[in-house]
Amino acid sequence: MSVTPDRLLEFLGNHWIMASGLLIVTILLIQDFIESAFRKHKVISPLEAVKLMNDESTVIVDVREPHEYANGHIQNAKFIPLGKIEERANELEAYKQNPVVVTCQSGTRSPQACKKLIRLGFTRVFEMKGGMLAWEDQKYPIVKKRNSK
């Protein structure tokens, strides 16, 4: 049985919600592919972040809000909320050539922070995929002591 243009149009007309959903998903997949092709930072898993922390003088930058950070963070993480990256970038100046792993709660704010750090001249920026939720899912240690800043 062959599919003619008339039958295809009839199908799309009868199932317009499904066809719209397919179109939207296709567009989002293409957008994600294009963004990842032009991304200047690397996306890594929590395990890869641990390997970087063990192998090199890596700095972790936590860009969450104060209450999120207080609920648990990676030991020795630099706490700089996303909205303050530019004004507090001088605190990270010594790490411009080091690996910088950026984390947030779920991985939605980290890409913005990575872009800002790259614009500020950081050369080895990594986004931790899934953020602290992924870190905690892996049962990696967290510190629940509040930072003084």
Image (cartoon, rainbow, N blue to C red):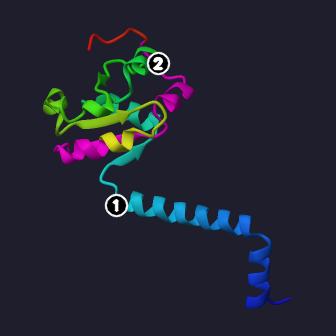
Q: Quadrant of the N terminus?
A: bottom right
| Quadrant in the rendering for residue 143 | top left
Q: Earlier in the sequence, mark 2 or mark 1?
A: 1
Q: Is residue 132 magenta?
A: yes
Reading the image, the residue beneath label 1 is 38
Q: Position of residue 131 (x, y in %)?
A: 46, 33
Asked whether 73 or 58 is in front, the reply is 73
Query: In percent of the image, x 31 and y 12: which residue is there?
Result: 147
The spot of residue 29 in percent (x, y) is 53, 61
For the record, the magenta segment spans 114-143
Q: Which residue is mark 2?
A: 141
| Relative vertical location of residue 134 with respect to residue 30 in this rendering, above or below | above
Is residue 138 or residue 66 the one in the foreground? 66
In the rendering, at what x and y percent does residue 109 appear?
A: 40, 38
| Identity of the residue drawn at 76% across and 76% down | 13
- Sort mark 1 into few (<14), some (14-19) or many (20+) by Cα contacts within 10 Å: few
Image quadrant occupied by the C terminus: top left
Amino acid at circle 1? Phe
- Image-based side of 27 in relation to 90, left or right: right
Compute the Cα span from label 2 to label 1: 33 Å
Identify the amino acid type marked 2. Answer: Pro
Q: Name the residue nearer the viewer: 122 or 21.
A: 21
Q: Nearer the viewer, mark 2 or mark 1?
A: 1
Q: What SS does tag 1 mark?
A: helix
Q: Position of residue 6 (x, y in %)?
A: 77, 89
